[in-house]
C-alpha cells in the first residue's frame, strides 16, 4: 500500500455494528481530567487486516490527516534503518560506531552497532522523566538542556558504568547515538536519508522527524505521522 489503503470501513461498521460500538466506547470515552494521565486517552485508531483498512476512528479533535507524535515508538523506525544499512551498505553489527561517526570521546569507539541496538552501551545514562529533579535525568538534558545542540556527542561523552555488551538498560541516549551513526552510514543519501530509503518507498508521506541543531535526528523519539502511515510501517513488518 504505497499510496492509499483500500477501505472497507463502512462495511465493517455495517457487519459488526455492536463490536465497533464496543471498541469506540472503550477507546474514546474519557474519564476524569484529560490531563491527569489516567484512563484510556485514545486520539485515533486505524486497523488494517489483509492489506485493507477495516476500521478508523478519531477523537479529541484529531482527523485522519493529522499527524500524531509516536514518542518512543520512533525507535522502531531507527531499527528499520539499521536493517536497510545491513542489506545495502554492508553494515555489520560488530562494527565500531567510530567507523561511521567522528566523536569527541575516543572511549566511545569501543561501542559497536550491536551494543547500541540492544541498549547495552554500559554508559552511565539516567532515563528518568518524572518523580525527580530534572538535573538527574540524562534524557531530559539531552532533549531540552545542555545536550540538545549535539545529542550524539552528549550521549557519547557520558562515563561508562559497565563494560559494553554486559548489561541492558533502556536508553533513548543509546538510540539517538545510533541515529547519529546512521547519518554517517547514509551520508551519500544526504540529510533526508530516512525518507529516501524508508519512508518514501512505503508511501509514508506525512512523516516528520525532529533533529538537533547539528542535524542528527532524535533516534529515540519525535517521529510524527498519521495513523494510516504508521500502519504502513506495521504492515511492512
Image: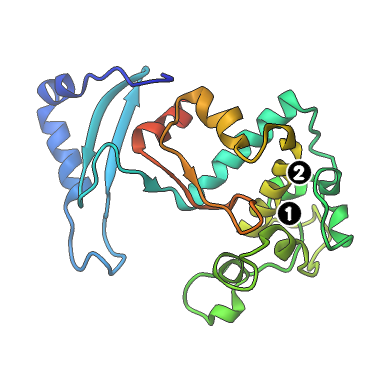
Report which residue position mark 2 lands on.
114
79 displayed left or right of 85: left
Where does residue 178 sit, x and y in percent of width and height?
70, 48
Where does residue 213 sit, x and y in percent of width and height?
62, 59
95 displayed left or right of 138: right
Where does residue 71 sit, x and y in percent of width and height?
46, 53
Label 2 Cα neighbours within 10 Å, binned few <14 / some 14-19 / many ≥20: some
83 displayed left or right of 76: right
Give how far apart the Cα atoms at labels 1 and 2 are: 8 Å
Residue in the picture at 74% in, 61% down: 153
Q: Is tag 1's residue or tag 2's residue first in the polypeptide sequence?
A: 2
Where does residue 163 sit, x and y in percent of width and height?
84, 60
Q: Nearer the viewer, residue 189 or 39?
A: 189
37 displayed left or right of 10: right
Label 1 Cα neighbours within 10 Å, binned few <14 / some 14-19 / many ≥20: many
Report which residue position mark 1 lands on.
120
Q: Nearer the viewer, residue 131 or 74?
A: 74
Residue in the picture at 63% in, 51% down: 215
Residue 140 sits above or below residue 167 on the image:
below
Helix, strand or loop at mark 2: helix
Residue 214 sits above or below residue 25 on the image:
below
Residue 206 visible in image? yes
Amino acid at each position: 500500500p504505497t499510496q492509499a489503503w483500500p477501505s472497507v470501513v463502512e462495511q465493517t461498521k455495517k457487519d459488526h455494528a455492536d463490536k465497533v460500538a464496543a471498541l469506540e466506547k472503550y477507546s474514546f470515552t474519557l474519564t476524569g481530567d484529560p490531563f491527569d494521565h489516567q484512563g484510556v486517552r485514545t486520539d485515533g485508531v486505524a486497523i488494517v487486516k489483509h492489506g485493507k483498512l477495516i476500521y478508523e476512528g478519531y477523537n479529541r479533535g484529531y482527523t485522519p490527516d493529522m499527524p500524531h507524535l509516536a514518542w518512543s515508538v520512533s525507535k522502531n523506525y531507527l531499527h528499520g534503518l539499521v536493517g536497510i544499512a545491513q542489506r545495502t551498505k554492508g553494515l555489520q553489527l560488530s562494527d565500531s560506531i567510530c567507523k561511521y561517526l567522528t566523536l569527541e570521546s575516543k572511549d566511545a569507539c569501543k561501542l559497536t552497532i550491536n551494543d547500541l541496538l540492544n541498549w547495552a552501551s554500559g554508559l552511565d545514562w539516567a532515563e528518568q522523566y518524572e518523580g525527580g529533579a530534572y538535573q538527574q535525568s540524562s534524557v531530559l538534558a539531552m532533549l531540552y538542556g545542555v545536550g540538545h545542540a549535539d545529542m550524539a556527542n552528549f550521549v557519547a561523552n557520558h562515563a561508562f558504568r559497565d563494560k559494553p555488551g554486559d548489561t541492558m538498560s533502556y536508553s533513548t541516549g543509546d538510540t539517538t547515538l545510533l541515529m547519529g551513526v546512521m547519518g554517517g552510514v547514509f551520508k551519500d543519501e544526504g540529510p533526508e536519508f530516512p525518507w529516501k530509503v524508508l519512508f518514501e518507498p512505503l508511501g509514508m508521506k506525512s512523516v516528520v522527524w525532529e533533529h538537533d541543531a547539528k542535524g542528527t535526528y532524535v533516534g529515540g523519539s519525535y517521529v510524527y505521522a498519521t495513523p494510516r502511515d504508521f500502519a504502513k510501517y506495521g504492515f511492512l513488518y
